[in-house]
Image (cartoon, grey):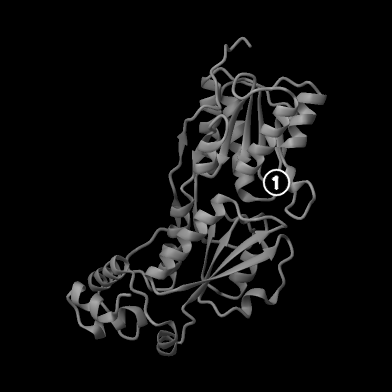
Amino acid sequence: MAKIDDVAKLAKVSKGTVSNVFSQKRPTSNEVKERVLSVSRQLNYVPNHIARSLVTKKTMAIGLTIPHGSFLFSAFHTQFINGVILEASYYGYRVLLDMIPQMKVQTPFLSSYPIDGAVVMQPVTDDERIALLDSEQIPFVTVGRVMNATVRDVYSVDNDNREVIYSICEYLIGRGHRHIMFLNANERMTVSIDRIRGFMQAMNDYRLQVEPHMIHHKPDMSSNEYMDYGYEETMSVIGESKKRVTAIIADDDRTAFSVLNALKDLRLRVPEDISLFVICGDMSMMVQANPPLTSMDLLPSELGAESVRLLMSQLGVRPGNTPRNVIIASKIIERHSCQTIDQED
């Protein structure tokens, strides 16, 4: 394990300077601070939290709040959390993971936390976590757009979710699909609202009619229907109502596999009968599926790392000017679950 002497030697500064960079007890130039932090990352150096806390009067911990139901983390969550933990460790911070029941935020939950700041994942409209953080004046970063009427100028990191769905629709429409079913996230999530706007814009731009059976929203995490989201919707629309669907956009890998199960029960094949596109999926699972599933790479690890960088800037740990809102690029990963069809079909 690297020691402070190792960092000082490689960064060509004194041990006292390394200590100052992490303790912020005395000012250090931005150039020296960046050099020390860069070497610390390279050597995986982590300062002693207890000693540093005594000097700085800070907890040296940040909170990561994630709404949950009775389910295990998805691959997206795991990769995102890894990005947060690794980046936080570069700055000498620990991560306090807070799993809170969705829509059941208790007022004292943040004010009593031993944290210097927080990362808020999966914000919803009028999110109580965001309102509490703002009222308690605790620095925070959201992963997703904020839609709280009384909260302004928030630091956030996100994908361009409107453009994500627009590009997926454009990809499918370019392959001849005109009858697309969209299995979106929960309707209160801000990402879901942005996605709907992208979907409607794409349909409008290509002069395609949007019918009620085409758009669905994931149930609340606490509901019994959450784990099977995608199965019943597919069975109802395609099996019972006999609606015309040539392509399905699934919110995540769990939803996609529920769709695959439903299509199997309906004796339909992917992609020969129905094309399937996954917005947010585990890349290894996408490859192992039969057929391998075309998906969007949202770079969850980079989302996590960038959220910490923005938070460190608020805490004065990371030097330099930082934008309040950062958009992480995404890209389509083509596999074998989407087929080109005749536009007349």
Q: Outermost residue, right direction? A: 240
The percent coordinates of residue 246 (x first, y second) are: 65, 21
Q: Which image quarter: residue 88? A: bottom left
| In this rendering, position of residue 307 left or right of residue 44 | right
Judge whether 3 appears above or below 325 on screen. Answer: below
Q: Quadrant of the C terminus?
A: top right
Quadrant of the frame with the N terminus = bottom left
Q: Please name the amino acid that badge 1 sits on.
A: Glu
The spot of residue 138 in percent (x, y) is 55, 74
The answer to whether residue 163 is seen in the rendering is: no
Q: Residue at x 74, y 48 (%)?
A: 226
Locate residue 51 relative to residue 235 in the image: left or right.
Answer: left
Q: Quadrant of residue 329?
A: top left
Is 224 situated above or below 318? above
**Among all residues in the image, which is located at the extreme top?**
344
Query: Label 1's element?
Result: loop
Whether residue 148 is visible here, answered yes or no, is yes
Pointer 1 local density, CA inside 10 Å: few below 14, some 14–19, many at least 20: some
Q: Residue at x 30, y 83 (%)?
A: 19
Q: Which residue is the extreme one toward the left?
A: 12
| Residue at 40% from the left image edge and 89% from the top image edge | 55
Name the foreground residue: 181 vs 80: 80
Q: Residue furthest bottom?
A: 54
- Identify which residue, 258 or 146, lies in the foreground: 258
Q: Is residue 331 above or below residue 337?
A: below
Location of residue 14 by image quarter? bottom left
Callout count: 1
In the displayed structure image, the side of residue 56 where residue 120 appears, left or right: right
- Tell me where residue 30 appears, x and y as whole percent: 26, 71
Q: Give the answer, above or below, for where 212 lies relative to 317.
A: above
Question: Where does label 1 land, which residue?
Answer: 187
